[in-house]
Image (cartoon, rainbow, N blue to C red):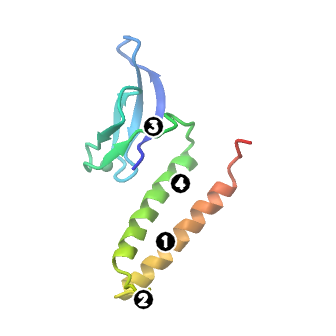
């Protein structure tokens, strides 16, 4: 999953290297990391592999950051749901039916949020 990068800045050491805060969308662990020179790192909190976002460091506000976390949660629930859905589309338990509702609610929340964002064109 993509890491959340924020607060790009000069390193306090004054050696000219830029650093940023890397937040794990899965467990919320924050680490300070060099801004450049890596493609993926392991989260020190949960060991998840975090990819450097393709766009580097997009401007993130708290709403965008929350939208990314909600997306990670939605994708995890959707994977659980796929694993417990029978070939004929039914669920093997009531929990599967509830998961389907959760995934739809989170997807609607993400869409509603994205519709409020300024478009780049
Ligand atoms: Zn983590």
**In front: 35, or 89?**
89
Q: Residue furthest top?
A: 15
Q: CA distance from mark 1 to mark 3?
A: 26 Å
How far across and how far down the image is residue 73, in percent?
Answer: 43, 61
Q: Where 82 falls versus 13 (above or below)?
A: below
Disc 4: which residue: 67
The residues tagged by marks 3 and 2 sit, at their Cα atoms, a distance apart of: 41 Å
Residue picked out by circle 2: 88
Task: Using a 10 Å C-alpha cutoff, classify the residue at mark 1 as few (fewer than 14 neighbours), some (14 to 19) or many (20 or more).
Answer: many
Which residue lies at the image location 48% right of the left edge and 58% below the top edge? Answer: 71
Mark 1 or mark 3: whose residue is earlier in sequence: 3
For label 4, the crowd category at 10 Å Cα-Cα, with few meaning under 14, some 14 to 19 and many 20 or more, is some
Quadrant (top left/top right/bottom left/bottom right) for the C terminus: top right
For the residues bearing labels 3 and 4, Cβ distance under 8 angstroms: no
Front: mark 2 or 1: 2
Mark 3–mark 4 distance (CA, rounded to whole Å) = 14 Å
Of marks 3 and 2, which one's residue comes earlier in the chain? 3
The 10 Å Cα crowd at callout 3, few under 14, some 14 to 19, many 20 or more, is many
Q: Of helix, strand and loop, which one carries label 4?
A: helix
Callout 3: CB less than 8 Å from ligand 1 = no
The residue where tag 1 is placed is 103
Say left or right for 63 vs 119.
Answer: left
Query: Measuring 35% from the left and 14% from the top, which residue is drawn there?
Result: 13
């Amino acid at each position: 999953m993509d890491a959340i990068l924020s607060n790009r800045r000069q390193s306090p050491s004054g050696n000219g290297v830029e650093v940023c805060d890397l937040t794990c969308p899965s467990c919320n662990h924050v680490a300070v990391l060099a801004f450049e020179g890596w493609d993926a790192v392991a989260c020190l909190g949960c060991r998840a592999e975090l990819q450097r976002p393709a766009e580097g460091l997009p401007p993130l506000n708290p709403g965008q950051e929350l939208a990314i976390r909600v997306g990670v949660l939605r994708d995890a629930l959707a994977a659980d749901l796929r694993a417990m859905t029978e070939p004929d589309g039914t669920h093997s338990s009531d929990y599967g039916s509830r998961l389907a509702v959760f995934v739809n609610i989170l997807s609607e929340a993400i869409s509603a949020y994205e519709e409020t964002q300024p478009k780049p064109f």
